């Protein structure tokens, strides 16, 4: 279950979708703490495999999305 949930989250982010924390938690039956842990795991993977991308958040809305870092 964990692997499929993390992959669903990663797939949604890489497809350009916006993830709303509350909606995701309800849909997949996970709590906020689990959601945050999954997001940390995805962020750690991105730092290694795709360092030009980060997971960004609009905290007021609880909306997460993938963002390309501007090149220096």
Image (tube, grey):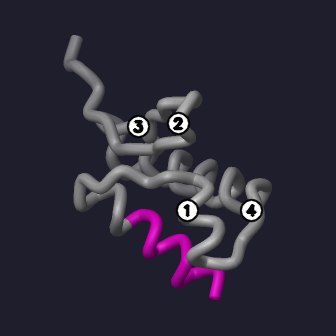
Quarter of the figure with residue 13: bottom left
Q: Sequence-wise, which precedes: disc 1 or disc 4?
A: 1
Give percent across and percent down for residue 43.
52, 46
Residue numbers of the magenta segment = 1-10
For marks 1 and 4, give the CA distance: 14 Å
State the mark number for residue 34.
4
For marks 3 and 1, give the CA distance: 21 Å
Q: Residue furthest bottom?
A: 1
**Majority SS type along the magenta span:** helix
For marks 3 and 4, give the CA distance: 19 Å
Looking at the rendered structure, the secondary structure element under dot 3 is strand
Residue that carries the numbered disc 1 in the rendered image? 23
Q: How many marks?
A: 4
Instruction: Judge whether residue 20 is colored magenta.
Output: no
Q: Sequence-wise, which precedes: disc 3 or disc 2?
A: 3
Residue that carries the numbered disc 2 in the rendered image? 61
Residue that carries the numbered disc 3 in the rendered image? 54
Instruction: Check if mark 3's residue and mark 1's residue have beta carbons within 8 Å.
Output: no
Q: Sequence-wise, which precedes: disc 3 or disc 4?
A: 4
* Residue shown at 67% from the left, 59% from the top: 35
* Residue shown at 26% from the left, 33% from the top: 68
* Image: 2 above or below 59: below
């Amino acid at each position: 279950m964990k692997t499929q949930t993390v992959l669903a989250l990663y797939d949604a982010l890489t497809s350009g979708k916006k993830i709303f924390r509350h909606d995701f938690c309800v849909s997949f039956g996970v709590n906020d703490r689990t959601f945050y842990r999954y997001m940390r795991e995805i962020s750690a993977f991105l730092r290694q495999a795709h360092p030009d991308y980060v997971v960004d958040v609009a905290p007021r809305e609880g909306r997460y999305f993938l963002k390309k870092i501007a090149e220096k």
